[in-house]
Amino acid sequence: EAGVVQSPRYKIIEKKQPVAFWCNPISGHNTLYWYLQNLGQGPELLIRYENEEAVDDSQLPKDRFSAERLKGVDSTLKIQPAELGDSAVYLCASSGSGAPYEQYFGPGTRLTVT
Amino acid sequence: QQQVKQSPQSLIVQKGGISIINCAYENTAFDYFPWYQQFPGKGPALLIAIRPDVSEKKEGRFTISFNKSAKQFSLHIMDSQPGDSATYFCAAREDQAGTALIFGKGTTLSVSS
């Protein structure tokens, strides 16, 4: 079974530029999460999707961050414009109805904003 | 307010020794407590998890001990190996399917050979 796929793995951009991250969850997993992981810290939730519906986006900075999961499978997280403080690893995770407590993470996208 | 407090921040153990990482929580609505292992450049990988209806769960060299009354849980790695050198995160989540995990700050384990 393929794991959670994320791309790109690394991204370097200048501040004020836009950036987008893509995630493909494990096949059949209806719940998708985007987490932010700062250096030396544990992941923190940005947004959670149940199928195509964003059911928890309370921690998403909506002035510059947006996300979508149009067909309830793949998801894209966007930052526009990026700030220096956005440098971090952006992790995508998914879980399925068969084992809703078990979240599986992708390798993450390491963003560096210069 | 940090909902899951993890200690120590770093740990050095000799090969063959026992590694112990502790976590404490306050929210009594938490009912699922996983541990994740993360290697540099990789995403966190689910290692082992426990529900509060049991006090201990063992999978191979990894054991979770859970103390509901003290609101504490710990990870024990028996016969620690250099390949276990990684960052370990405890986490917790509330009793609702699909809710997000609340992570501790992590413990960097180094197993010396």
Image (cartoon, coloured by chain):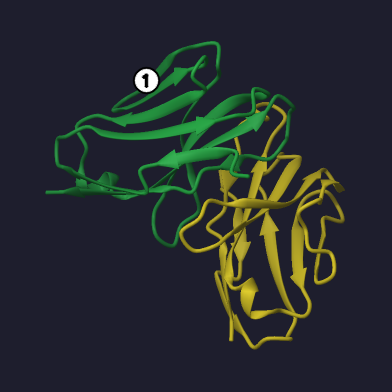
Chain colours: A yellow, B green
Res. B28 image quadrant: top right
Instruction: Say which chain tag 1 marks.
Output: B
Count of numbered circles on the image: 1
Residue at 20% x, 41% y is B81
Instruction: Give the residue at the far front of this rendering.
Output: B1
In the picture, the quarter occupied by the N terminus of chain A is: top right
Could you tell me which secondary element the residue under label 1 belongs to? strand
Instruction: Give the residue at the far left of this rendering.
Output: B113
Q: Observer-nearest residue: A66 or B29?
A: B29
Residue B68 appears at what percent x and percent y? 52, 16
Q: Name the residue under label 1.
A: B58
Position of A93 with respect to B34 (left or right) is right
Position of A56 with respect to A102 (left or right) is right
Label 1: how many residues lie within 10 Å, few (<14), some (14-19) or many (20+)?
some
Residue A14 appears at what percent x and percent y? 64, 88
Residue B94 appears at what percent x and percent y? 68, 29
Residue at 69% x, 79% y is A83
B51 vs A100: above or below: above
B91 vs A15: above or below: above
In the picture, the quarter occupied by the C terminus of chain A is: bottom right
Q: Observer-nearest residue: A24 or A44?
A: A44
B43 vs A55: above or below: below
Residue at 64% x, 72% y is A86
Residue at 76% x, 54% y is A59
Position of A32 with respect to A106 (left or right) is right
Query: Callout 1, which amino acid?
Result: Lys
Q: Observer-nearest residue: A90 or B76?
A: B76
A30 vs B73: above or below: below
Residue A76 appears at what percent x and percent y? 76, 63
